[in-house]
Image (cartoon, rainbow, N blue to C red):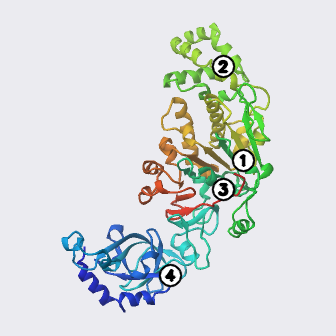
Amino acid sequence: MADPVELERKLKINAVASPVEQALSLAPDEIGRICIAEELSIATEDKKTHIEVYIPEEKRNELALGDYVVIPLGYKDYKIFASVEQLCYRKRDALDDMSDVHVFVGAERLGEDDYIETAVLNPISMIGPEGQALEVRYIPKPNTLVRKVTSEDEVKIGLDLPDKGLFLGFVAVNGEPIQTRQKQYVPYYLINDETKTGDPLIFTHVLIAGMSGRGKTHVAKNFVRQIVGSVYPMERRGGEQRKPCIVIIDPENEYWKMREDNPYLTKDAQEMLFGHGIKFGGIKEKLTVYAAVEGEPRYSGCPKYTNFTIPFTLVKDFPYLIAGGELDENQYVSLVQLVRDFFYYHENGTYQEFLDFVDNPNTLEMYKQNGRIHPGTFQALQRRVDRPQFHKIFDQGANSLTQLYNDIFAEDVVSVFATKHLSPDAERIVVLAILSMIADAKLKSAPTDWGRRIEKFPIVLVVDEAHRYFTRDQTQQDRVIVEKFIKAAKQGRKHRLALVLITQSPKDLNESVLAQISTRILLGMEREMAEFAGAPPRYQKVLPYFERGRMIVHAPDNSKPLELKGLDFCVVMH
């Protein structure tokens, strides 16, 4: 640390005027001048870069950590775009605050002007003469004026933000949106076309995470509304342009209201949304709620919905639907063999016919003779495949999932699968069936009518409470579905599959699935959870204090990590 007396002397020598005169000469958006307290340096390594600003007394209350500032170089037509990384007071004299003399100085004789305030800046980028974003390559001179960011262009160029795309929120600092000189907020968009990245970033997958009550569903609804009606080229189908099919797994019955307009959306709010190109209003008949039947219809979560059933024939493609959590690897391999043999003899077999096949003494005798399933393993499977939940969920009547696929998987529709009315076991079977159909179709491993249908369109799969289905603690059943989605997610751009995973417990999400996600929208959460969710280290300690709607966005292909403030209202009914 430099000697305080020497620091004060240098500041006065370097300045063109006294500190008070400097403050009086500063414009409203100027906050101070570059000083050399210890050194002034830029380097390729962050730890060796040190830019410090002297803050006059009259400006001390105008600066906060995280504020964005600009340093015009003067000697070149470049500006350094930076954020305030540290604020500190330094001693104006050599008197130790803890000395006996200082302790007994009266409060009326000791004030803030006995100290010097400086701010340490973190240079983010350099704005070139033609408005381009560059790496920081030139050093500012001592005594250079530093000012707060005042224009939308400076924010967009400095943070390398897209001009259009899927709206997420407004660029913010400490919970407050940045205001430009024109009193406008700066919108943040996720790239939604082929410019810059070569592909819309939605197909590199999105995580929305935060503690309960911090606005996850609100943010998710506003985000999904922006996707509705977007157009994407299908790489594997000659580049034809198609609108996505959005499939929402809704365990809390929260998304059906997206059909309707928000009745509290004021005219001023609508004009603001329109001015920023933000989509709003209910999506009406594009949205259909589907409710699975368990034993008998029980869903009553919204006025208009379609019941559906799970046909046992899906087990032919997905044997793990009847695996439960108890089977070990050897038993699961035997179950797959058992299911394969059953459908060899019963192409469109039902669950009851499967039980009859398993209970038939001739079946056990067949396996004793061919040795494909050990008798002990077979008897264990007999007990495990005959469960009450299977009787209630399979083959419950008309409107089977494999009959409704043309309506569920169609261009420019939103299919919401409500599951709150189901028992936990039934819910798991229903969700796994839907996830499996999508994953297999996109991996081209489902040579079925529904598989070919799903392959035609971009699919945006929104999974609320995602940690329930892509879990870290895996059974054999979990491992199979997770492996499918890891493969599908890795090829999301090519197959036009986008995952939007929403969770309040990212630490329970499977690490391999989480590793496939490029864009992370993180609301208020505990520090340990923030680390699991992939928050940049500098934000992990502040996320616990984030109020509702305040978020960090970490999207490496889109921009630098930064803070956003979401809309205070929902663009659809909430």
Residue 495 drawn at (x, y percent): 63, 49
Q: CA distance from mark 4 to mark 1?
A: 53 Å
The answer to which of 172 and 200 lies nearer the viewer is 172
Choose the circle earlier in sequence order: 2 or 3: 3
Q: Is residue 32 left or right of residue 434?
A: left
Residue to which mark 1 is pinned: 456
Residue type at tag 4 = Asp
Q: Is residue 197 above or below residue 123?
A: above
Residue to which mark 3 is pinned: 222
Secondary structure of the residue carrying tag 3 is: helix
Q: Which mark is residue 342?
A: 2
Residue 156 drawn at (x, y percent): 56, 72
Q: CA distance from mark 3 to mark 4?
A: 33 Å
- Asked if the residue under mark 1 is in contact with the one under mark 2, i.e. CB atoms within 8 Å, the reply is no
Choose the circle earlier in sequence order: 2 or 1: 2
Secondary structure of the residue carrying tag 2 is: helix
Choose the circle earlier in sequence order: 4 or 2: 4
Q: Is residue 249 visible?
A: yes
Residue to which mark 4 is pinned: 29
Residue type at tag 1 = Lys
